[in-house]
Amino acid sequence: MATKEFEKVFTKVQTTSACHQKCVIVLTDIYKKTPREEFMQLFLKFLQLVVRQNIDNGQYTKRVLNFVSMFCADLTKKEQKENQTHEFLTPIIEKTIEWSVTNVYDIRYNSCYFIAMVLQDIGEEVQLEVNLIDEIQRVMLERMQENKIPIRLAAMSALVRLQDPHNFECPVIQAYLRALLSGSAQIRKEATERIAPNVMTLSKIRDRVRDTDVGVRAMAFHRCADIGPLNFRIVDKHLILLCGFKETNEKVKKTFSEYLLPKWLTGYKGDFLKFLEALKLIADEEDISKMTYLSRELIRVFYNQNPIDDLIKALPINEEKLINVEHLTNNVTLFWNILTNLLRESDEMDRYLNEILPEMTPFCHYLDRVITAKSAEQMDEWKFFEYQFDLLNLFEIAEKYDFSDEVGRRTMHSLTLKILQNNNFTLKLTKKLVAIAHKCSSNLEFFTHDMCQVISELQEPVVDEPLSLDKQRERDFKTAELRVKLNILKERQNEAINERNYQKAQELEQKLADVSNQLEKLQTQLDVEKVRVQKTDNETLCRCLDVLSSVLELPAVSKLTPSLITCRDQFLVPLIMNQGAEPHWRVLKCLALFSVIDKATAVDYAKIICIPIVTYRTVQINASVLTQSICSVTDLISLYGVEIIGQEEETINTTVDQTARRKLYTNDNEESMNTTNAKIDKITMSYIFEIYLDMLDDERDEIRHKAILAIAALVKQSFPVTASLLSRILLKWYSPLTEKHDSRLQIYLGYFIEQYTRFKTCGEVMKEAIVPTLTSLLRAPRTSPLADVDIDNVLNFFSEMMNIHLQNDDLRILALDLCMKILENVTDRIVPFLAKLLYNLELERTNVACKTELIERGEMLLENLSDKQPRKNIEKLVSKLKQSCVIQTNTTVNTTEQMSESQILEETNNTGNEQTCNVLQEVSINEQDIIKGPQQVKRRKSRSNKNCVVVLEKLNLSRINQNRCNETTLHTIIETSMEMDIDNHLTIETPTTNSSNSSKISSRMSKIVITETSDSE
């Protein structure tokens, strides 16, 4: 009777889940009516039947297993005793564990799935025995090691409740951490969803937002949203938000913007300002830029998702539509700035904009009050940094005002000039103030005059100085003279009164008043006077140079005005010999900016800008000065060509010991500077190019990176690449030291090589670089990193490049040259590698005569070679060439026979037959062309693909790091200029180019694009 009832229940629950709750009640009644042992036997029997079901019937099997799990959990919750496990549940789980270790895949999967469902349904109300928990954990951890992904997923679900977040050595958590690195996206996604958050696992969950799989990234954002922002560090929140805003997949973007961001905002109780405050990490300019970007994107999303009134209410605006000075913080000013920009972008939001912003003139007065109040406070470096960040946001708001208001424009203009003269701010804020001053000016001449006047006031301010002794004596003499005059006038006035000459007395009274006023002024005058003093300290010079560079960087300043010319000649040029590091690189920058605007200035001062580069080998150069010089020279060459530096051949002594280093900014360098100045007219681009190569070995990262980018820019300008240059680049690229300590440099080098291989004549240069490169590798001492380079990898690179870029004749010449090199010294260490390179060349594509000549040379090599390895490669080469000759000869004979038969048919047949034979012959030739054509195209195509593959195999391009541009770079910052297409119409003659080889140089012209990708993945 009970068996039939069991069958009825189990049959019903597999069709739909809607009846499960009702069937649980029915099965519970059966449980109460049936003896325990009998019920247990029937229950296990039917459960075993279900577990043995094929996984193809998954939906029906899972419905039954879900029902059984629900029944077990319901029965256990009703009848369990305190601190004891129900006697029904324990044997069920134990039996299922036994089934989970069978060899049958379906049984193992269904068993794991059932255990997972039971542990999920019993919840936290039911306690299991420790031994039973340990057994479940052991078996499920074993199942996680299987190759079958469904079983691993089921086992991971079963282990969720067995995690101990407080135990860093928890085996379940360790298993989940390993699963996060699995090759299966399903496993990574399940682990991301199941793993318990703690100090150790939060960073692992965070990293999954950069996973390659869309589903894993979506789950990672979903999990980060559930964990909440308060549990993540600031840098973790930055990474999560940055990846979310950079996401390209629509599904993941939707999860991020519609689930994570609202939940995180709820974590801060809907307070937008608290959210922005939680992102605050101001340590340097990079942190500020990152925080500003994230804040803008956040507010933009909330602006689209929330009512505009909620955003406006978050601002502490007073009745004057301003924010009180005491309430100004970084997050408030940033939020105010972002919100006003968003409102200005929409024409429909003008009324809301008027609620949070006053007119321009009151806003100018407000800015003046803020600066006055803040300047009076005692601020340390950190507070001053935050203060400038606030001002930058406030002036960004001011910059977007309508400057058609005459009164407001004049007020803003006077305010910016006053701030520039009286405050020392960062370069970024200085640029913003200069840009606003330019918008307030009516024309360029007035603007440049005002800015040059600001520079003059900064360098030669009016100050109070004590009076000299001579001026004090002069003042005392005038005072005594006025007193005597005053007494005389009083006597004359008394006489006139006595004589009753009142008219004269009245006139004397007026004179007495004037003299008394003069005497009072002299007596009240302080012992100081107003004089102009020229300041030469580095801080003042840096302020002046920052203002000047900010003016020159404006796109509107496209020509030199009289004010700028005067400022250049009287202020900037005398500072060229300044010995301070900070002013020096600013001077170079301003000179370069003047040169960009005016070619005559570039002609006069281009070699001055080169001085830090030229003195690199003899003195220790400050990194800022050297990088500015490299960037400036590169920009000038890109703009005017290499002739801007000089056309003379190199005459500077390059044999200086590069290990001798001295400091640039000390008295010891005067002799070196004088020597450099004496030879400045002899600076050539070739010499600078060699120094760039030396910089690739510099210990400073920024110098190495700027140097390779400068080299790439020069090659863009058709500067000839020599074999020695290419050899040094290749050795630096293959060096294990570069790969280990400077992956960014290796990426730059790899892109340079990959782009250079697109040049038509790169094969000729690379052919000449083979022997020098291999010789350097073979002669490298054991202590050198080049000793660890895989020479076979280098040989494969050279052979592929030669096969791709050399024509048949050039390939034959290269093979003959290699044979001659081997014959010079058959015992040389380089011989085995040259022999292997010979074998790798595609010499079989040459004609029969070439092959015959190469076979003769190969047999000559075999007579002289004694080493086994090179002999083996030469033998294989000779055999390959002979076989190719036989095939090519047979093909020629067949073709000749066919042509002879055609001639006989032509002579014996009539005109119609002649026409038919001609048609057949034409068809035959076309068929051969059709057969050979695709093969040749396929081969050449595969070679072209290998061109990139060989170069890119050594690079891990998915880890390229996004380099932020340095603010000290010029108009066209070098990293950005590397990503731009060069003007193909620009023809540049190099200093070493004459008329005879100009055509060869022009043939080298091509595009080289050095790009940097982000590290968001």
Image (cartoon, rainbow, N blue to C red):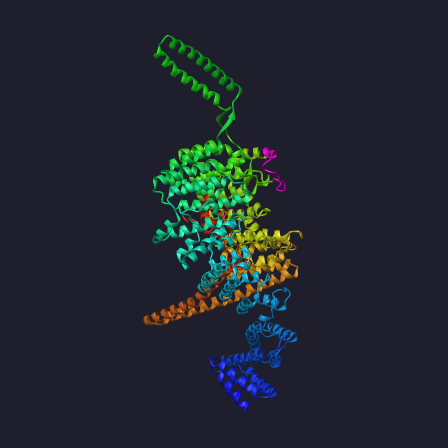
275 or 646: nearer the viewer: 275
For the residue pair 727 and 814, the one nearer the viewer reads as 727
Q: Position of residue 784 (x, y in %)?
A: 65, 51
- Vertical side of 315 occupied by 553: above or below: above
Q: Residue at x 59, y 64 (%)?
A: 876
Residue at the far right: name it. 782
Front in this rendered view, residue 275 or 176? 275
- Residue lying farthest left? 912
Question: Residue 305 in the image: x percent, y percent?
Answer: 41, 59
Q: Position of residue 99 (x, y in %)?
A: 60, 81
Nearer the observer, 999 or 585: 585
* Magenta stretch contains residue 619: no
What secondary structure characterizes most of the magenta part?
A: loop
Q: Is residue 602 visible?
A: no
* Identity of the residue furthest to the top in this view: 499
Q: Relative to 670, say whether 892 is above or below.
A: below
State the extent of the magenta-drawn residues as a range.
656-671
Image quarter for residue 103? bottom right
744 vs 171: above or below: above
| The magenta stretch spans residue 664 | yes
Q: Quadrant of the N terminus?
A: bottom right
Q: Is residue 367 left or right of residue 180?
A: left
